[in-house]
Image: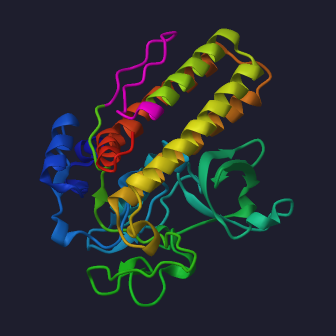
Amino acid sequence: MEKWARAYGDAARFVCVSCAGPELGAEFGSSLSLKACINTWVAPRDMPTWGQLGCNGLIVLDGSGVVVCQSSPAFLEVRETAFAYVETLLAALLTGGSGAAPSGPRVQPGAVVRLRGLVARADLNGQEAVCIRAMDAASGRCDVRVGEQTLSVKLVNIELMNPSDVGCSAGGCDAGGGCDAGSCADGTCALPKRPADGGDCGCKTKAQKHETAAVPTPPPRVPGAPVLVASVKVDSLDAEHEECAAALGRLAQERSPAAARALLGCYESHFAHEEGLLDKHLYASSALVSGGFSADAGARRSHWADHVRLLDGVGTLLARDTIEQGHVEALAADFEAHAASYDGAYANRLAAALAAEGVA
């Protein structure tokens, strides 16, 4: 956000909103040196009743305040491509003002498309996907990601979507509230109805939300160094972190499928235990199941998604013919970063909750 604010100057405004009071906003502003973007906070009495953390998707408005993108692709799902999408959309708004796809290649990385006419994977027709690689001139195909799958598809099998259509099926949320056709029905965004299955309808608040605790970015990992994870102040989880670190150390030494499978087992066991503890002692909130905005719900969703990403990383390693040291090093760096960013964020709260409940 800060980089964008500096790059776009007065052409666009970028807003970060703390959902945990001014203290968190000030902490983020200081730790991230936020000066060009707008850094503010929302009081509990004014807390939005729907929305999401910024890592789960950004909201883009045009110059007149109309929502042209209810939810950009989530960083947790497509990583850096999420930023490319926002930049592509901003380019369209600043040059044409309509939110339509910009000129240039028909499908660029970050663009949201709808799959159509697939034969071998007819089950995916009608689903939204994100372009992660532009069309190859030789094959006439581009790579898209849908869910956890990556496909190489022909241009005839994708439909470039208007940003205002992304996120809510059938052009918006159910009648009775929310964003409709990319604009707010009453000028302030009425409350959206959630789908019957409890999922996210795709409409978001205008403000981005941060995690509930500011965690310093860990220093770059030294290649070959032992995996280090700070204590989360819960003995059982600390022990599991040590087991995972030891499994990564074994994998670095052996670079064998057996060591990779052992690491996968450690991850699966630890993640299941950790998620169970957090759901029971921190996230047992009605906001998680009844709809509406919840910082804890956003933190939970992003944390769980990163667990999936780490498991996928080991799965990808097991699919390789050979395991290189660089592959192992990448897994170690990812685990350290995850522990610092996600586990460090819940450490104090979970330890206090367990202590208050008399749980060792």
Query: Looking at the picture, does residue 341 appear above or below residue 96?
Result: above
Residue 48 in picture, x, y percent from top left: 27, 71
Furthest-bottom residue in this view: 176
In the visual, does 103 lie left or right of 352? right
Q: Residue at 54% across / 56% down in the picture?
A: 111
235 falls in the magenta region = yes
Asked whether residue 85 is in view, the answer is: no
Vertical comparison of 309 with 58: above or below:
above
Residue 194 image position (x, y, % from top left): 48, 78
**Residue 181 vertical placement versus 104 (above, below):** below
Question: Furthest residue to the front?
Answer: 358
Q: Is residue 203 visible?
A: yes
Residue name at image x 74 percent, y 29 percent? 318
Q: How many labels does the image show?
A: 0
As drawn, is 168 to the left or to the right of 287?
Answer: right
Highlighted range, magenta:
217-237
Query: In percent of the image, x 48 and y 27: which residue is there?
Result: 239
